[in-house]
Image: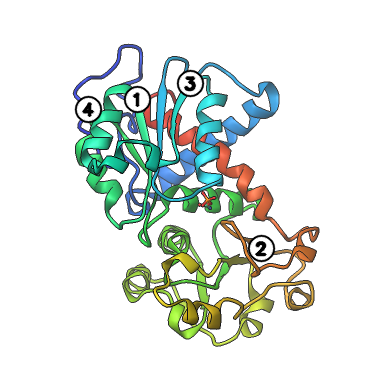
Amino acid sequence: MPTKSKNPHLPFGDRQTAPWYGKNILSVKQFSRDDLEYIFSVAHEMRTMVERVGTFDLMKGKILANLFYEPSTRTSSSFMAAMQRLGGAVIPISEVKFSSVAKGESLPDTVRTLGCYADVIVLRHPEVGSAALAARHAGKPVINAGDGVGEHPTQALLDTFTIREEMGRLDNLTVTMLGDLKYGRTVHSLARLLTQFDGIKLNYVSPEILRMPRDVMDEVAGKGIPQSEPMSLEKVLPKTDVLYVTRVQKERFEDPGVYEKVKNAFVVNPKVMKAAKEKMIVLHPLPRVNEISMDFDDDPRAAYFRQMEYGLYVRMALLALVLGKA
Ligand code: CP
Protein backbone atom coordinates (compact mmCIF):
# COMPACT_ATOMS: atom_id res chain seq x y z
CA MET A 1 0.00 0.00 0.00
CA PRO A 2 1.16 3.58 -0.59
CA THR A 3 2.85 5.60 2.13
CA LYS A 4 0.70 8.01 4.09
CA SER A 5 1.37 11.72 3.67
CA LYS A 6 1.83 13.68 6.86
CA ASN A 7 -1.28 15.74 6.42
CA PRO A 8 -2.58 16.80 9.84
CA HIS A 9 -5.59 18.65 8.38
CA LEU A 10 -8.21 16.25 7.04
CA PRO A 11 -10.97 18.24 5.34
CA PHE A 12 -14.56 17.66 6.39
CA GLY A 13 -16.60 15.64 3.90
CA ASP A 14 -13.87 13.40 2.50
CA ARG A 15 -13.97 9.65 3.04
CA GLN A 16 -11.10 9.73 5.47
CA THR A 17 -11.35 6.01 6.20
CA ALA A 18 -10.90 5.13 2.52
CA PRO A 19 -7.69 3.04 2.23
CA TRP A 20 -6.01 5.41 -0.23
CA TYR A 21 -7.01 8.64 1.45
CA GLY A 22 -4.09 11.06 1.91
CA LYS A 23 -1.49 8.65 0.54
CA ASN A 24 1.52 9.35 -1.65
CA ILE A 25 2.06 7.51 -4.92
CA LEU A 26 5.82 7.24 -5.30
CA SER A 27 6.66 3.80 -6.71
CA VAL A 28 4.95 0.82 -8.28
CA LYS A 29 6.40 -1.24 -5.45
CA GLN A 30 3.53 0.09 -3.30
CA PHE A 31 0.82 -1.80 -5.19
CA SER A 32 -0.52 -5.28 -4.58
CA ARG A 33 -2.50 -7.09 -7.24
CA ASP A 34 -5.71 -6.30 -5.34
CA ASP A 35 -4.76 -2.61 -5.35
CA LEU A 36 -4.28 -2.76 -9.11
CA GLU A 37 -7.62 -4.44 -9.69
CA TYR A 38 -9.29 -1.76 -7.58
CA ILE A 39 -7.57 1.13 -9.40
CA PHE A 40 -8.47 -0.38 -12.76
CA SER A 41 -12.11 -0.80 -11.76
CA VAL A 42 -12.27 2.87 -10.71
CA ALA A 43 -10.50 3.88 -13.95
CA HIS A 44 -13.06 1.90 -15.90
CA GLU A 45 -15.85 3.78 -14.10
CA MET A 46 -14.13 7.08 -14.89
CA ARG A 47 -14.05 6.15 -18.57
CA THR A 48 -17.76 5.39 -18.50
CA MET A 49 -18.50 8.72 -16.79
CA VAL A 50 -16.37 10.74 -19.23
CA GLU A 51 -18.04 9.05 -22.20
CA ARG A 52 -21.47 9.65 -20.67
CA VAL A 53 -21.24 13.16 -19.20
CA GLY A 54 -17.74 14.51 -19.97
CA THR A 55 -17.21 16.47 -16.76
CA PHE A 56 -18.71 15.95 -13.31
CA ASP A 57 -18.40 17.38 -9.82
CA LEU A 58 -16.75 14.62 -7.79
CA MET A 59 -13.78 16.85 -6.86
CA LYS A 60 -15.49 20.21 -6.72
CA GLY A 61 -13.51 22.44 -4.35
CA LYS A 62 -10.31 20.39 -4.66
CA ILE A 63 -7.07 21.84 -6.05
CA LEU A 64 -4.20 20.07 -7.77
CA ALA A 65 -0.71 21.62 -7.91
CA ASN A 66 0.92 20.33 -11.10
CA LEU A 67 4.66 20.92 -10.61
CA PHE A 68 6.90 19.99 -13.54
CA TYR A 69 10.68 20.60 -13.50
CA GLU A 70 11.09 18.62 -16.76
CA PRO A 71 9.19 18.87 -20.06
CA SER A 72 5.94 16.94 -20.43
CA THR A 73 2.93 16.91 -22.70
CA ARG A 74 0.93 13.81 -21.76
CA THR A 75 1.52 13.47 -18.02
CA SER A 76 1.12 17.15 -17.32
CA SER A 77 -1.94 17.75 -19.49
CA SER A 78 -3.67 14.48 -18.57
CA PHE A 79 -3.39 15.24 -14.84
CA MET A 80 -4.78 18.72 -15.49
CA ALA A 81 -7.58 17.33 -17.65
CA ALA A 82 -8.27 14.64 -15.03
CA MET A 83 -8.73 17.21 -12.25
CA GLN A 84 -10.84 19.46 -14.46
CA ARG A 85 -13.06 16.60 -15.65
CA LEU A 86 -13.63 15.79 -11.97
CA GLY A 87 -14.75 19.36 -11.33
CA GLY A 88 -11.61 20.47 -9.46
CA ALA A 89 -9.08 23.23 -10.16
CA VAL A 90 -5.38 23.21 -11.05
CA ILE A 91 -2.32 25.32 -10.19
CA PRO A 92 -0.13 24.63 -13.24
CA ILE A 93 3.63 25.14 -12.79
CA SER A 94 5.17 23.78 -15.96
CA GLU A 95 7.83 26.43 -16.35
CA VAL A 96 9.65 26.41 -13.03
CA LYS A 97 11.93 29.14 -14.38
CA PHE A 98 9.00 31.53 -13.85
CA SER A 99 8.52 30.35 -10.25
CA SER A 100 10.69 31.01 -7.20
CA VAL A 101 12.70 27.92 -8.14
CA ALA A 102 14.57 30.34 -10.44
CA LYS A 103 15.57 32.31 -7.30
CA GLY A 104 17.07 29.19 -5.78
CA GLU A 105 14.15 27.91 -3.74
CA SER A 106 14.62 24.28 -2.70
CA LEU A 107 12.25 21.46 -3.60
CA PRO A 108 11.18 20.97 0.07
CA ASP A 109 10.28 24.68 0.41
CA THR A 110 8.50 24.71 -2.95
CA VAL A 111 6.27 21.74 -2.13
CA ARG A 112 5.70 23.01 1.42
CA THR A 113 4.38 26.19 -0.19
CA LEU A 114 2.15 24.39 -2.66
CA GLY A 115 0.87 22.17 0.15
CA CYS A 116 -0.60 25.32 1.72
CA TYR A 117 -2.69 26.03 -1.38
CA ALA A 118 -3.45 22.65 -2.94
CA ASP A 119 -4.93 19.32 -1.82
CA VAL A 120 -2.59 17.14 -3.89
CA ILE A 121 0.74 17.70 -5.68
CA VAL A 122 1.87 16.00 -8.90
CA LEU A 123 5.65 16.28 -9.32
CA ARG A 124 8.04 15.62 -12.20
CA HIS A 125 11.69 16.24 -11.37
CA PRO A 126 15.04 15.22 -12.93
CA GLU A 127 16.47 13.62 -9.77
CA VAL A 128 15.87 10.06 -8.59
CA GLY A 129 14.18 10.14 -5.16
CA SER A 130 12.83 13.69 -5.59
CA ALA A 131 9.20 12.60 -5.19
CA ALA A 132 9.99 10.80 -1.93
CA LEU A 133 11.83 13.91 -0.71
CA ALA A 134 8.87 16.11 -1.65
CA ALA A 135 6.46 13.76 0.11
CA ARG A 136 8.35 14.25 3.38
CA HIS A 137 7.78 18.02 3.26
CA ALA A 138 4.56 18.68 1.36
CA GLY A 139 1.96 17.91 4.02
CA LYS A 140 -0.33 16.79 1.19
CA PRO A 141 -0.27 13.67 -0.99
CA VAL A 142 2.48 13.68 -3.64
CA ILE A 143 2.13 11.75 -6.88
CA ASN A 144 5.39 10.91 -8.66
CA ALA A 145 5.10 11.92 -12.32
CA GLY A 146 8.67 10.81 -13.09
CA ASP A 147 11.82 11.20 -10.97
CA GLY A 148 14.82 11.28 -13.28
CA VAL A 149 15.75 7.79 -14.46
CA GLY A 150 14.00 6.34 -11.40
CA GLU A 151 10.29 5.58 -11.74
CA HIS A 152 7.15 6.77 -13.49
CA PRO A 153 4.50 4.83 -11.55
CA THR A 154 1.38 6.42 -13.02
CA GLN A 155 2.68 5.63 -16.52
CA ALA A 156 3.13 1.97 -15.54
CA LEU A 157 -0.40 1.93 -14.15
CA LEU A 158 -1.83 3.32 -17.37
CA ASP A 159 0.33 0.90 -19.38
CA THR A 160 -1.06 -2.08 -17.51
CA PHE A 161 -4.60 -0.69 -17.72
CA THR A 162 -4.08 -0.36 -21.49
CA ILE A 163 -2.90 -3.97 -21.74
CA ARG A 164 -5.93 -5.14 -19.75
CA GLU A 165 -8.38 -3.18 -21.89
CA GLU A 166 -6.74 -4.09 -25.21
CA MET A 167 -5.71 -7.72 -24.62
CA GLY A 168 -8.49 -8.62 -22.18
CA ARG A 169 -6.02 -10.00 -19.61
CA LEU A 170 -2.83 -9.29 -17.71
CA ASP A 171 -1.74 -12.90 -17.11
CA ASN A 172 0.15 -15.20 -19.48
CA LEU A 173 1.68 -12.52 -21.68
CA THR A 174 5.06 -12.19 -23.33
CA VAL A 175 6.12 -8.55 -23.11
CA THR A 176 9.09 -7.31 -25.13
CA MET A 177 10.63 -3.97 -24.13
CA LEU A 178 12.62 -2.29 -26.87
CA GLY A 179 14.96 0.71 -27.05
CA ASP A 180 16.46 2.72 -24.21
CA LEU A 181 15.99 0.46 -21.22
CA LYS A 182 18.74 2.14 -19.19
CA TYR A 183 17.32 5.66 -18.98
CA GLY A 184 13.67 4.84 -19.74
CA ARG A 185 12.03 5.12 -16.32
CA THR A 186 8.72 3.87 -17.73
CA VAL A 187 10.20 0.43 -18.42
CA HIS A 188 11.74 0.26 -14.95
CA SER A 189 8.30 0.81 -13.42
CA LEU A 190 6.48 -1.44 -15.90
CA ALA A 191 8.85 -4.41 -15.47
CA ARG A 192 8.38 -4.19 -11.70
CA LEU A 193 4.61 -3.84 -11.93
CA LEU A 194 4.21 -6.81 -14.30
CA THR A 195 5.70 -9.10 -11.64
CA GLN A 196 2.25 -8.96 -9.98
CA PHE A 197 0.76 -11.10 -12.73
CA ASP A 198 1.00 -14.82 -13.52
CA GLY A 199 2.73 -16.32 -16.53
CA ILE A 200 4.56 -13.12 -17.55
CA LYS A 201 7.71 -13.42 -19.67
CA LEU A 202 9.89 -10.35 -20.26
CA ASN A 203 12.30 -9.78 -23.15
CA TYR A 204 14.64 -6.78 -23.20
CA VAL A 205 16.01 -5.70 -26.59
CA SER A 206 18.34 -2.69 -26.58
CA PRO A 207 21.73 -1.42 -27.68
CA GLU A 208 24.45 -2.86 -25.44
CA ILE A 209 25.00 0.47 -23.64
CA LEU A 210 21.28 0.92 -22.90
CA ARG A 211 20.48 -2.40 -21.23
CA MET A 212 17.92 -2.80 -18.46
CA PRO A 213 19.63 -1.89 -15.13
CA ARG A 214 20.84 -4.84 -13.08
CA ASP A 215 18.92 -3.77 -9.95
CA VAL A 216 15.60 -3.86 -11.85
CA MET A 217 16.43 -7.27 -13.36
CA ASP A 218 17.40 -8.64 -9.96
CA GLU A 219 14.12 -7.46 -8.44
CA VAL A 220 12.13 -9.00 -11.28
CA ALA A 221 14.12 -12.26 -11.04
CA GLY A 222 13.39 -12.33 -7.31
CA LYS A 223 9.69 -12.57 -8.16
CA GLY A 224 10.31 -15.62 -10.37
CA ILE A 225 9.64 -13.86 -13.70
CA PRO A 226 11.65 -15.25 -16.66
CA GLN A 227 13.69 -12.56 -18.45
CA SER A 228 15.89 -12.65 -21.53
CA GLU A 229 18.09 -10.13 -23.35
CA PRO A 230 18.10 -11.23 -27.01
CA MET A 231 20.40 -9.47 -29.45
CA SER A 232 17.68 -8.86 -32.04
CA LEU A 233 13.99 -8.05 -32.09
CA GLU A 234 13.37 -10.59 -34.87
CA LYS A 235 14.21 -13.40 -32.48
CA VAL A 236 11.36 -12.64 -30.04
CA LEU A 237 8.83 -10.64 -32.07
CA PRO A 238 6.81 -13.65 -33.36
CA LYS A 239 6.00 -14.71 -29.78
CA THR A 240 5.42 -11.22 -28.38
CA ASP A 241 1.96 -10.19 -27.10
CA VAL A 242 2.96 -6.64 -26.08
CA LEU A 243 5.80 -4.77 -27.77
CA TYR A 244 6.70 -1.80 -25.56
CA VAL A 245 8.85 0.63 -27.54
CA THR A 246 10.82 3.48 -25.93
CA ARG A 247 12.62 6.54 -27.19
CA VAL A 248 16.40 6.80 -26.82
CA GLN A 249 16.56 9.62 -24.28
CA LYS A 250 18.92 12.16 -25.83
CA GLU A 251 18.69 14.46 -22.81
CA ARG A 252 20.25 11.84 -20.50
CA PHE A 253 23.44 11.39 -22.60
CA GLU A 254 26.60 13.25 -21.56
CA ASP A 255 28.26 12.66 -24.95
CA PRO A 256 26.07 13.61 -27.97
CA GLY A 257 28.29 11.44 -30.19
CA VAL A 258 27.27 8.32 -28.27
CA TYR A 259 23.59 9.25 -28.68
CA GLU A 260 24.08 9.64 -32.45
CA LYS A 261 25.48 6.10 -32.65
CA VAL A 262 22.52 4.42 -30.93
CA LYS A 263 19.57 6.68 -31.68
CA ASN A 264 18.27 4.64 -34.62
CA ALA A 265 19.35 1.21 -33.46
CA PHE A 266 15.76 -0.11 -33.62
CA VAL A 267 12.91 1.14 -35.77
CA VAL A 268 9.46 -0.46 -35.77
CA ASN A 269 7.75 -0.20 -39.16
CA PRO A 270 5.21 -2.18 -41.20
CA LYS A 271 7.94 -4.39 -42.70
CA VAL A 272 9.35 -5.36 -39.29
CA MET A 273 5.83 -5.93 -37.94
CA LYS A 274 5.06 -8.56 -40.62
CA ALA A 275 6.80 -11.03 -38.31
CA ALA A 276 4.50 -10.19 -35.35
CA LYS A 277 1.24 -11.85 -34.33
CA GLU A 278 -2.03 -10.54 -35.67
CA LYS A 279 -3.42 -10.31 -32.13
CA MET A 280 -0.84 -8.29 -30.23
CA ILE A 281 -0.31 -4.60 -29.38
CA VAL A 282 2.45 -2.06 -29.75
CA LEU A 283 2.73 0.45 -26.90
CA HIS A 284 4.95 3.50 -26.43
CA PRO A 285 4.85 5.99 -23.54
CA LEU A 286 5.53 8.74 -26.10
CA PRO A 287 6.89 11.11 -27.23
CA ARG A 288 8.45 9.17 -30.12
CA VAL A 289 11.21 10.37 -32.36
CA ASN A 290 12.08 7.76 -35.04
CA GLU A 291 11.62 4.47 -33.23
CA ILE A 292 8.12 3.82 -34.64
CA SER A 293 7.55 4.96 -38.20
CA MET A 294 4.39 6.97 -38.82
CA ASP A 295 3.27 4.60 -41.55
CA PHE A 296 2.57 2.01 -38.83
CA ASP A 297 0.11 4.30 -37.01
CA ASP A 298 -2.98 3.04 -38.85
CA ASP A 299 -2.27 -0.61 -38.04
CA PRO A 300 -4.88 -1.86 -35.50
CA ARG A 301 -2.02 -3.20 -33.36
CA ALA A 302 -0.67 0.35 -32.91
CA ALA A 303 -2.24 1.05 -29.50
CA TYR A 304 -0.01 3.94 -28.40
CA PHE A 305 -2.51 6.71 -29.06
CA ARG A 306 -5.29 4.79 -27.31
CA GLN A 307 -2.79 4.29 -24.46
CA MET A 308 -2.62 8.09 -23.96
CA GLU A 309 -6.37 8.26 -23.55
CA TYR A 310 -6.40 5.43 -21.00
CA GLY A 311 -3.95 7.59 -19.03
CA LEU A 312 -6.67 10.17 -18.42
CA TYR A 313 -8.97 7.60 -16.78
CA VAL A 314 -6.21 6.11 -14.63
CA ARG A 315 -5.12 9.56 -13.43
CA MET A 316 -8.73 10.52 -12.66
CA ALA A 317 -8.95 7.33 -10.57
CA LEU A 318 -5.72 8.08 -8.71
CA LEU A 319 -6.76 11.65 -7.86
CA ALA A 320 -10.14 10.45 -6.62
CA LEU A 321 -8.53 7.72 -4.53
CA VAL A 322 -5.93 9.87 -2.75
CA LEU A 323 -8.51 12.58 -2.08
CA GLY A 324 -10.98 10.12 -0.57
CA LYS A 325 -13.59 10.42 -3.32
CA ALA A 326 -13.58 6.85 -4.60
N1 CP B 1 4.72 9.40 -21.29
C1 CP B 1 5.12 10.58 -20.80
O1 CP B 1 5.58 10.68 -19.66
O2 CP B 1 4.97 11.62 -21.67
P1 CP B 1 5.27 13.13 -21.34
O3 CP B 1 6.77 13.23 -21.12
O4 CP B 1 4.77 13.91 -22.52
O5 CP B 1 4.56 13.47 -20.07
- Spot occupied by residue 258 in the image (x, y as percentages of width and height): 47, 81
Task: Name the residue at 60% across, 85% down.
Answer: 232
The alpha-carbon separation of the residues under discs 2 and 1 comes to: 37 Å
Is label 4 or label 3 in front? 3
Other-residue count near label 3 (Cα within 10 Å), few / some / many at <14 / 14–19 / ≥20: some
CB at disc 2 and ligand 1 closer than 8 Å: no
Tag in front: 4 or 1: 1
Contact check, label 4 and label 2, Cβ < 8 Å: no
Q: Position of residue 289 (x, y in %)?
A: 63, 65
Residue indicated by mark 4: 7
Mark 3 beta carbon near ligand 1 (under 8 Å)? no
Q: Which residue is mark 2?
A: 282
Q: Tag 1 or tag 4, which sits nearer the N-term? A: 4
Where residue 118 is drawn, which disc sits there?
1
Cα gap from disc 3 to disc 1, whole angstroms: 11 Å
Residue 180: numbered disc: none
Q: Amino acid at mark 2?
A: Val
The mark nearer the N terminus, 4 or 2, is 4
Q: What's the amino acid at mark 1?
A: Ala
Name the N-terminal-most of marks 4 and 3.
4
Asked which quadrant contains residue 46, the reply is top right
Residue 15 vs residue 244, the one in the foreground: 244
How far apart are the two marked residues, 4 and 2, measured between alpha carbons? 40 Å
User: Which of the 4 image quarters holds residue 142?
Assistant: top left
Labels 2 and 1: the sequence-earlier one: 1
Residue type for callout 4: Asn
Q: Which mark is residue 88?
A: 3
Question: With respect to residue 314, does 281 lie above or below?
Answer: below
Point out residue 80 in the picture as x, y percentages from the top left corner. Answer: 51, 33
Q: Amino acid at mark 3?
A: Gly
**Quick one: label 1, few (<14), some, or many (20+) residues within 10 Å?**
many
Sequence-first tag of 3 and 2:
3
